[in-house]
Amino acid sequence: MTEHLDESGGPCKRHPPPSAANLMAMALLGSRMPSFHHDVASKLQSLMMAVDELTELAETIETRAAATAATTALKDLTTLFSTNRALGKAPQRRPTPAAEVFARAAERSSVKTSGELATCNVDIALPSIIHACAVILDLAAGPLAHGRTVELTGKTNGHVLEVIVTGPPNTPLPPNAGDVLALASFALVREGGELRCGADRYTIKLPLTP
């Protein structure tokens, strides 16, 4: 369940095995999410109404500017919250352009990409797959000193899109690399995909829309 694979199809030896304690700690945090999301959604709605009312009552240029800044920040916060909340919902697959998946994953992980993907739709639950791909892009890109750029090479193979993510050579990995790759692999496998690890590269497989 927690293993991810190398390019030969065997258990990956390039990354440390996931820590059961770390995974359980993440699961403990995840178990709090449903009630947390419910509570935060209610507070955000109340805050949005209050900011809207303050904006209408603002009389000076300075006050209106502050109210506008608060509204913008609140909208950004709501977007971040909604993105996180979507991960907790039951996965629902839908056709999605492959380019959109990796563009949003790159944006999420603050990574620049080069290369081209095949023009196609993949049949996935978008929130979890974007998260999984973002994790992989982040690991492949490495720390800021490495430029945070990866190359994407994607081609269709039967009913699958294969995307090779290549990062800078000898990219250092964080101590929890095995843990986050195990979770990314779980999300991909759940959606009919797969993750395989090679030297300075990762292969992500996603099912094409029938």
Image (cartoon, rainbow, N blue to C red):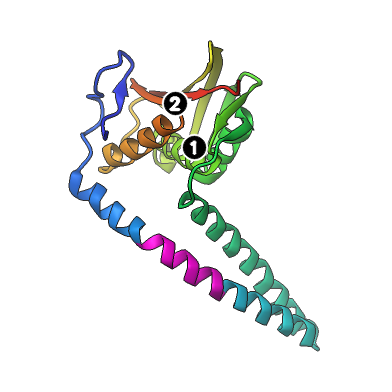
Residue drawn at x 46%, y 32% is 191
Mark 1 in CB contact with mark 2 (< 8 angstroms): yes
Q: Residue at x 74, y 77 (%)?
A: 65
Q: Position of residue 100 (x, y in %)?
A: 63, 34
Is residue 164 visible from the viewing direction of this image? yes
Answer whether residue 122 is magenta in the image. no
- Measuring from the top left, give residue 203's x and y in whole percent: 42, 22
| Picture coordinates of residue 116, whole percent (x, y) | 61, 21
**C-alpha gap between disc 1 and disc 2:** 9 Å
Give the residue drawn at x 30%, y 13%.
8
Q: Which residues are magenta?
A: 32-43
Count the numbered circles shown. Answer: 2
Label 1 SS: helix
The residue pinned by badge 2 equals: 193
Q: Is residue 34 above or below residue 174?
A: below
Q: Is residue 97 left or right of residue 3?
A: right
Query: Image height check: is 33 above or below 49?
Result: above
Mark 1 lies on residue? 129
* 8 relative position to 55: left or right: left
Q: Which corner quadrant of the image does residue 183 belong to?
A: top left
State the quadrant of the C terminus: top right
Closer-to-camera residue (210/20): 210
Viewer can see residue 200: no
Q: Amino acid at mark 1?
A: Ile
Amino acid type, callout 2: Gly
- At mark 2, the secondary structure is loop
- Quadrant in which residue 71 is drawn: bottom right
Quadrant showing the N terminus: top left
Q: What kind of secondary structure does the magenta stretch mostly adopt?
A: helix
Q: Residues within 10 Å of mark 1 (few under 14, many from 20)?
A: many
Q: Position of residue 190 (x, y in %)?
A: 41, 33
